[in-house]
Image (spheres, helix red, strand yellow):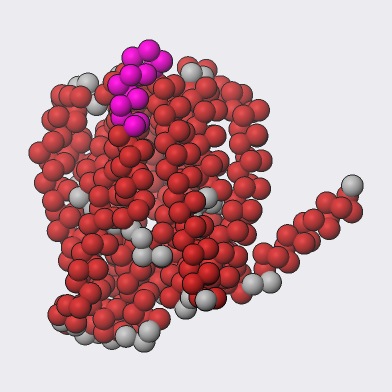
Amino acid sequence: MLSSTYAWARDLYFRLFQNPLIRRIITNSGYLFSATGISALMSMLQGILAARLLGPSLFGVLGAITTFASTVNRFASFRMNELVVRYVGHYQENGDSRRAAAVFKAASYLEMGGSLLAFALIWWLAPVGARFFAHDASLAIWFRIYGSIVLANLISESATGLLQIFDRFRAIAMITAMQSVITLALIAVAYFSNAGLAAIVVAYMLGKIIGALAFTGTALWQARSSWGPGWWRVPLRLLASERRSLVTFAFSTNISGTVSLIAKDSEVLWVAGFLGTTQAGYYKLALALSNLLQLPVSPLPKATYPELAREIARRNWENVRYVLRQGSRLSAAYSIATTLALGLFGRWLISRVYGAEYLPSYPALIILLVGFTFVNIFYWNRVALLSLSRPVFPTIVNFVGMVIKVAAILLLVPAYGYLAFAVLLTGYYIFTVGIAAARVLLDLRARMAYSFD
């Protein structure tokens, strides 16, 4: 038994690491995972301190404030990191540094406009957010204060994409870890001084501002190092022939992001709006524990996307399939084991660490783990479609899934409460990710057949 297990593990190791492409992806993912691991631990400790200090109801209010700002910000966002990876990577691969710099410049300008629009929307909609999601109009000022983080994030998405292209994953990891440590330190001060909601909101806000400024500064230094001190003077007219493609990509990812906001990234707001802040607190904790499942997997799309874009540009279809297949195997091995562990010990963990008053989170946790496991196994679905120049397809699939999910919310939530949200989110993941992954595999098969012909 032991010899067969050892032989299987050794075979898996050699299959994973014999390919230099996989080694590079795993190395870059390792940098991000080290930061993700630290951040997850810090985030978990942050959540424990905040949950114990605030109680379920105010913990739900905290979730409403932070989710509201990120939701509005992402509504105005064009996911510039994806555009930068796709087009800056393409031009760098072909030795056209001037067009690569022009893409980064254009992306930064567009993101600045989106960030300013997001801040204006947050300021304008804060009273509505406080009334409907926190159920307390007096909290509008805190919705606005926390919303100021978008001004620090003026070009953070473009900056992150640039760092990915130039394999600056170690820098990304260090900044992410630093941000988490600073946030935890501030929350710990608030906890041990028995401060209230305001101190916790400020702690989260300051941590995110410091992280965003660090990403931006590092990316601007990288641009100067790679393209020279005058890179920002490169004229945007160099992109005239690609204008339509760039605009289509940017707006399709924006629409896709908006659909995702409604369908899956604003769950706490949905629960708070329909069921109140106490059940939102339960659901926020269930989501936080489910995110443990994504610890080593969440860095993989960022590390995989640049490599897929390069290999597809070179038409190395076998390498592309190899990356997807080995990535799914690696992710499945971790995800299934972690799901079983959280299923067995989740109730004990919630009771002992967060307090018995949070035990209603456990059923939602079990349901969510199913959906997150499925997402993990096919983590590459979106970045593969973007690399294959199909940015519109996931938008269409996600839109259909969103319509079905929203209709089901109106039917099921009044009868089944916050557990209905967990069931519907899991169903949404299986539906959308399953179709997107199938499209990737069919597309690769067709392109391989064409290349052989």
Q: Nearer the viewer, residue 331 or 181?
A: 331
When the figure is inspected, residue 84 is found, relative to residue 279, above or below; the finding is below
Tell me, yes or no, if residue 333 can be seen here. yes
Q: Nearer the viewer, residue 173 or 117?
A: 117
> What residue appears at the point 52 percent right and 70 percent down from the top-left corner?
448
When the figure is inspected, residue 378 is found, relative to residue 423, above or below; the finding is below
When the figure is inspected, residue 295 is found, relative to residue 131, above or below; the finding is below
When the figure is inspected, residue 325 is found, relative to residue 335, above or below; the finding is below
> What residue appears at the point 41 percent right and 22 percent down from the top-left corner?
420
Image quadrant where residue 142 sits? top left
**Residue 287: horizontal and vertical position, in percent?**
45, 34
**Residue 220: horizontal and vertical position, in percent?**
29, 73
> What residue appears at the point 88 percent right and 49 percent down from the top-left corner?
2
The stretch of residues the image draws in magenta is 404-417
> What residue appears at the point 64 percent right and 53 percent down from the top-left corner?
329
- Farthest residue in the top direction? 415
Residue 179 in the magenta stretch? The answer is no
